[in-house]
């Protein structure tokens, strides 16, 4: 079945097209809007967006594949993104990533069976001064430690249970 872009996203794409007449310039912000819908971007969605912007599917897919912020698989409710670049690496990010893998019983790139957590190692999050950094969806958690990751997981579980 063909992917149906939501009315909200279509309206946002139209708004962006008025600001940026070049369709290529709209591609990345439009992909962000589409990702907000389901937390990831299926192949059919790339196809639908390409048709809407008159940009070849291969070009859309190339952009989605290039940027790690775009998800090509369904995500857990909380996407834990552990920065692995140099500042975070020297501040202990690798140990935190291993700790999270153990605690969640998944490997980097996987989602817990309950669909609650997806764990990723990502490139620099642009907050090197507060390394190590873990982003949970759009929110940064800075100056992290193993102990703080345990508290963070507990808080996220509590948040999920309260909904
Ligand atoms: S290296 Fe981790 S935020 Fe820059």
Image (cartoon, helix red, strand yellow):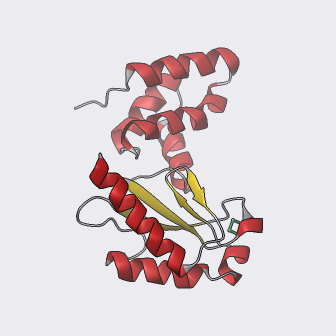
Q: Which residue is at the front of the view, 105 or 59?
A: 105
Viewer can see residue 24: yes
Quadrant of residue 103 in the image? bottom left
Q: Is residue 35 above or below residue 88?
A: above
Q: How many labels does the image show?
A: 0
Specify the farthest residue to the right. 129
Viewer can see residue 74: no
Q: Position of residue 68 (x, y in %)?
A: 55, 57
Q: In this view, does 99 lie above or below 2?
A: below
* Residue under the point 69% across and 18% down: 19
Quadrant of residue 129 in the image? bottom right
Q: Is residue 129 above or below residue 47?
A: below
* Residue under the point 22% across and 32% down: 1
Q: Which residue is at the front of the view, 72 or 61?
A: 72
Horizontal side of 92 relative to 101 (left or right) equals: right
Q: Which residue is at the front of the view, 97 or 60?
A: 97
Horizontal side of 15 relative to 157 (left or right) equals: right
* Residue under the point 55% across and 16% down: 14
Horizontal side of 76 relative to 8 (left or right) equals: left
Q: Position of residue 67 (x, y in %)?
A: 58, 53
Q: Where is residue 9 in the image (x, y as percent from the top left)?
A: 46, 25
Q: Quadrant of the C terminus?
A: top left
Q: Is residue 142 above or below residue 105?
A: above
* Residue under the point 60% across and 57% down: 140
Q: Where is residue 114 in the image (x, y as percent from the top left)?
A: 23, 62
The image quadrant where one finds ligand 1 is: bottom right
Quadrant of residue 34 in the image? top left
């Amino acid at each position: 079945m063909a992917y149906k872009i939501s009315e909200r996203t279509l309206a946002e794409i139209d708004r962006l097209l008025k600001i940026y007449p070049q369709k290529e310039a709209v591609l990345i912000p439009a992909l962000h809007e589409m990702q907000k819908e389901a937390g990831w971007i299926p192949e059919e969605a790339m196809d639908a967006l390409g048709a809407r912007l008159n940009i070849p599917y291969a070009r859309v897919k190339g952009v989605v594949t290039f940027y790690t912020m775009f998800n090509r698989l369904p995500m857990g409710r909380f996407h834990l993104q552990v920065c692995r670049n140099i500042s975070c690496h020297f501040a202990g990010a690798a140990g935190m990533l291993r700790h999270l893998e153990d605690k969640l019983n998944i490997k980097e790139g996987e989602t817990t069976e309950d669909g609650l957590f997806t764990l990723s190692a990502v490139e620099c999050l642009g907050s090197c001064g507060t390394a190590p950094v873990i982003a949970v969806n759009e929110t940064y958690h800075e100056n992290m430690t193993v102990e703080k990751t345990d508290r963070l997981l507990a808080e996220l579980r509590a948040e999920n249970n309260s909904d």
